[in-house]
Amino acid sequence: MAETKYIFVTGGVASSLGKGIISSSIGKLLQARGYSVTIQKFDPYINIDPGTLNPYEHGECYVTVDGHEADLDLGHYERFLGIQTTKANNITTGRIYKSVIDKERRGDYLGKTIQIIPHITDEIKRNVKLLGNKYKYDFVITEIGGTVGDIESLPYLESIRQLKWELGTNALCVHLTYVPYLAAAGELKTKPTQHSVKELQSVGIQPDILVLRTEHDLSQGLRKKVALFCNVDESAVIQSKDMPTIYEVPLRMQEQHLDATILRKMGLPVGETPALGPWRDFLDRRHRATETVRIGLVGKYDLQDAYKSILEALSQAATYNDRKADIHFINSEKLTDQNVEEQLSSMDGVIICPGFGQRGIEGKFVALKYCRTHNVPTFGICLGMQCMAIEFARNVLGYADANSREMDEKTPHNVIDIMEEQKSVTHMGGTMRLGAYECVLTPGSKVMEAYQTEHIKERHRHRYEFNNDFKAEFEKAGMNCVGLNPESDLVEIIEIPTLKWFIGTQFHPEYSSTVLKPHPLFLSFIRAAIGQ
Ligand code: GLN
């Protein structure tokens, strides 16, 4: 395709309507037609990135291969499209302002007064086009965080207005709204949608396509009404009904010709509808699975979004093992030697979650001791892996005061220590060991059997590491270091080979598990959990 096409996805009426899933579904459908596609998220908050944000505020922090701490929607983009995103795929208002202010300090603006229009909007537009210009994608989908009508969204909407004007049919706006059902009246209401579209129109944007989130089917009459009031074609009013799984959404969008409507509106040939074979196979398998695999997630956040990628990786791996993932949150703050049996004995497998700080950490040791001594398949991720090492040092090596430097600055048994390059860090944002690093696996280990290769690359996000001074002692007592960074010798994976499945990874494998390429470690973990 000669020129990159730009699709903007905005949202109105309420937040959390699933803009990320709609953006990913559009991307998936266009990709299935042979187009090269990327998706980016623009977030209207002032933080430079979500790395310093509490998961209660913003859910999981996703990490890209190039080491950017990013919005969790980038995880959806990767899981749906099987692409890799980078730092350029996630922009925040903070980053836009920072780069404008840096330019101003350098004197790049030659004495001009710096204003939201044109300087901030120009910087937004430059970032919208960055990936398209560099990699010549056929489509760049830009999801705008927040809701139309928010003060902080305005510069983004103004940039979209300008881009739609400049790019003509090469730009298109998909607006996602909500159609509430009033039970008392027994009616679906379109007024909030009409108001939300008016709000967009008032800043000069006419949406081209409306996607209406709803809990009930929308009648043809209702679609007609929305089309009439909102200046869109009837065929461009699409419903997005609640689905048992987000992975159904691309199929439902395809049935309503969302992709064909986009192509038509952008002046491209529509052609045949792609079959989406492997995607449908995945969904069929998921629906057919009746038996469950019970997984306990031991962590301090009892909130879905905090462990988004882990949940998705688990459910994908369960599907490929013809099981339904039955996941139970187990609050590590409440776990004690007294209740651990009751909490964990019915689990087929246990995940010890990543995390930061002291809160809930002792409960993780309680869980690990139980799992290790009862031979429960156990997967420790990042802090979870560090806890595996600490629990082993305390209860097998006999160092009652073993700990991580993160939790105890003075212990002589610092089996988890601060990394050398982290000692001088003074700023919190973007300074961890971040992004994909190489790792070499030990032949004969369970991990190598799972990966079926010796050289892997996985994504990291941490400041502390396994302390190599204790390596020989650990191995002698039965916990092996089976994955090493070839340059720094950092221990990236530990396992107890005599147990069914007891593996900890310093990296986060969950970030790279996708619908069509489930992660080998999660597959192997679920296989062990169901006793294969
Ligand atoms: N807090 C630990 C560290 O910084 C682990 C981080 C994590 O689990 N992502 O090393």
Image (tube, rainbow, N blue to C red):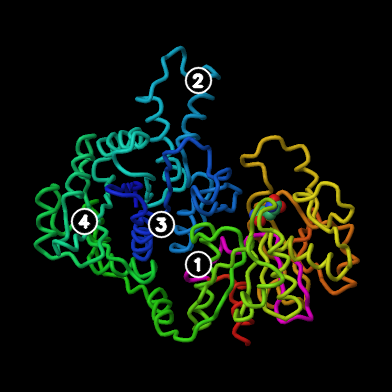
Residue 264 — which label? Answer: 4
Q: Is residue 41 left or right of residue 207?
A: right
Over which residues does the magenta segment extend? 494-517
* Residue 513 is a magenta residue: yes
Q: Residue at x 90, y 66 (%)?
A: 472
For the residue carrying disc 1, how many other residues have a C-alpha within 10 Å: few (<14), some (14-19), or many (20+)? many
Tell me the SS state at disc 4: helix
Q: Nearer the viewer, residue 142 or 59?
A: 59
What is the secondary structure assignment of the residue under circle 2?
Answer: helix
CA–CA distance in space, label 3 to label 1: 24 Å
- Residue at image position (12%, 60%) is 222
Q: Quick check: 132 left or right of 165?
A: right
Marks 2/4: CA–CA distance: 42 Å
User: Does 209 appear above or below 42?
Assistant: below
Marks 1 and 2, the one that precedes in the sequence: 2
Q: Can residue 460 be seen at all in this image of the molecule?
A: no
**Which residue is the site of mark 2?**
104
Q: Three-letter amino acid code at disc 4?
A: Arg
**2 up-or-down from 522: above or below:** above
Viewer-nearest residue: 209 or 505: 505
Residue type indicated by callout 3: Ser
Query: Residue visible at 60% across and 59% down?
Result: 300
Q: Quadrant of residue 522?
A: bottom right
Label 1 – label 2 distance at C-alpha: 43 Å
Image location of residue 395, percent across then percent down: 83, 69
Residue count near mark 2 (Cα–Cα under 10 Å), binned few <14, some 14–19, many ≥20 = some
Beta carbon at label 3 within 8 Å of ligand 1 = no
Q: Earlier in the sequence, mark 2 or mark 4?
A: 2
> Cβ–Cβ below 8 Å for labels 3 and 1?
no
**Residue 312, label in figure:** 1
Closer to the chain start, of discs 4 and 3, is 3
